[in-house]
Amino acid sequence: MGSWTGSEQQQLQMIHDQRMIVDYFYVASVVLLVYDHCLTLHREISLVWCRSGWTYTKIVFLLARYSVYPGVCLFLYNQLSLNVSFTACTRTHKATWPFSVLGIGSSEAIFMIRTWALWNRSRNIGLLFIMMSISMVVVGAICAMKFIGGLVVSPSPYEGFRGCFVTSSSTIAYVGLYYLFAFDATILIPMILSAYRARWPNDVDILGGRRSVASIVYHDGILFYTCLLCLTLTSATVVRFARFTLINTLYILTPVMYSIFSTRVILNIRSMGERGGAVSELHTIHFPQENTTHMPLAFRDGDVDQSNASQAD
């Protein structure tokens, strides 16, 4: 960088330091994804692959689980490869968006189907989620096209520069992320209301003691979704207010966490369902109890009263 002036060298050094921060977040996100996959691989084999038939639960699980990997690899190529050409940068940026949308969309489908099941497969809830999904696809596609169209990729400033040298980009992505935040909040609210209607299970131990299907469905689901809400809001705020060299800091972490949390929802429900003697699917979750075969998720007041009366006898 000997041909650069002092101010230009300082600016390049600042860009280099900020890109290193993004690199650390990217690598940490990949390590987290692979680590979680290794931890849950044995359950995936026994609870997903070893079950016969291709149900939509299995399909959305595999999409949420594996569609994140191509996008992660493409972004790592963009960020860490040496002397990436302008054409390669543009093509890989365009290619990453479909995988990100597919991964997050599949994860959202898992949460929506599970919430729909909590409401006893209500037609109104189902129609609401369908309309929300269509609007999310439209908003996401518009934001993706505008973001990619606003990218300005310049030649590498010096030999040995890693990744694409993006000198300008649109912050339109924050609109999609804020919309995703609102989308998630809309799903979380019915989930919390369903827990209240079902008389929040009194055997839920937040410290990891006694665990039941009710605990998995309500406690874990709400906890996971609250974490995703915080992550989405943080990511949108970074894109909106941070320097353009830092706007992609949480870009990989966001789909990674959606993949981890959503797939664990299915694995946890199926695992606890088998322990309780009932096969629990995403759209037909059962609460096994000592004296009953299945207990529906969406309780009515009469159902709870009869259940309590039978246990008292």
Image (tube, rainbow, N blue to C red):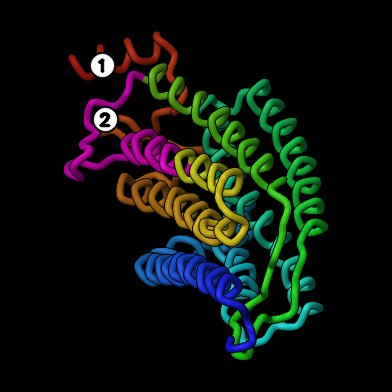
Residue for point 59% across, 48% down: 239
Residue for point 42% across, 68% down: 28
- Was residue 219 drawn as part of the magenta stretch in this picture? yes
Residue nearest the observer in this picture, 279 or 189: 189
- Was residue 84 drawn as part of the magenta stretch in this picture? no
- The answer to whether residue 30 shows anywhere in this view is no
Residue for point 39% across, 29% down: 295
Q: Which residues are magenta?
A: 199-228
Q: Quadrant of the N terminus?
A: bottom right
Which numbered circle lies on residue 310? 1
Residue nearest the observer in this picture, 183 or 162: 162
Q: Amino acid at mark 1?
A: Ser
Q: Secondary structure at mark 1?
A: helix
Give the residue number, with chain letter if any, for mark 2: 291
Residue most extreme to the front: 6
Residue 76 x, y percent position in the rendering? 58, 75
Q: How many marks?
A: 2
Residue 21 x, y percent position in the rendering? 46, 66
Q: Is residue 107 left or right of residue 38?
A: right
Q: Secondary structure at mark 2?
A: loop
| Crowd band around label 1 with a 10 angstrom C-alpha radius: few (<14), some (14–19), many (20+) | few
Q: Mark 2 to mark 1: distance in Å?
A: 9 Å
- The answer to whether residue 124 shows anywhere in this view is yes
